[in-house]
Amino acid sequence: MPPAIQPVLAARHSPLAFAAQPVTPTDRAALLEAARWAASSFNEQPWRLVYGDRHEDPAAHQRILDVLLPGNQRWAARAPLLLVSCALRTFTRTGHDNLHAWHDVGAAVAQLSVEATGRGLVVHQMGGIDRAAARHALSVPDDFDIVAGIAVGHPGDPAALDPDLAARQAQPRQRRPAESVFFAGRFPA
């Protein structure tokens, strides 16, 4: 039996069903603040998040939705808050490559996700994004990588999803066994 972890971490999941209920400006600000306080290499804070709130700025929400791949658009359209995460590829102080930028973006989004879970919201990250279209549509500067799309909202009713998506969401959450991902001292032979 694995050890108990903080309930907010155990509760985090990536659903496909989102309720129509808006994410409040207060909750959105708290999610972004949680991301802002993530640790990063040399305190570079290489993450940038472009967001679109369907209730406050439907055009921005649609711009982000439009750059998601069609399989993600099917369900993400219902999420009231969409984001795209970006990573600055170089250190601002030195101009050298920041090989940790994507890691640091992941840390920021993980903190956003935990904050969201603690507030009763759900987050689903997506690699299925048209990066070239996103760069153009969201005016992302050339020195940034586009990392992922992110859908945020209140949990929705899976019955409102297309049957194949509802079945996908109904699958039990799974993780690899601990012994297959954690190694004391070195990889096993």
Image (tube, rainbow, N blue to C red):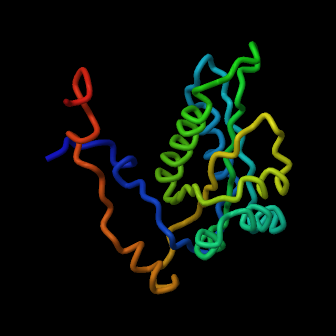
Instruction: Measuring from the top left, give residue 174's x and y in whole percent.
Output: 30, 58
Q: Residue placed at 68% from the left, 30% from the top? A: 46
Instruction: Measuring from the top left, give residue 21's x and y in whole percent.
Output: 62, 71
Total numbered circles? 0
Occupied quadrant, residue 129? bottom right
For the C terminus, the image quarter is top left
Horizontal arrangement in the rendering, residue 3 relative to residue 137 (left or right):
left
Occupied quadrant, residue 180? top left
Occupied quadrant, residue 56? bottom right
Question: 184 or 154, which lies in front?
Answer: 184
Looking at this rendering, what residue extends furthest in the left direction?
Answer: 1
Looking at this rendering, what residue extends furthest in the front direction?
Answer: 189
Horizontal arrangement in the rendering, residue 53 relative to residue 154 (left or right):
right
Q: Please determine whether, in this image, residue 119 is positioned above or below residue 91.
A: below
Question: 30 or 166, which lies in front?
Answer: 166
Q: Please determine whether, in this image, residue 86 is positioned above or below residue 78.
A: above
Instruction: Measuring from the top left, give residue 159's x and y in whole percent.
Output: 46, 85
Q: Residue placed at 22% from the left, 47% from the top? A: 177
Instruction: Measuring from the top left, give residue 134's x and y in whole percent.
Output: 77, 55
Horizontal arrangement in the rendering, residue 31 relative to residue 184 (left or right):
right
Q: Residue placed at 50% from the left, 70% from the top? A: 16
Horizontal arrangement in the rendering, residue 18 relative to residue 50 (left or right):
left
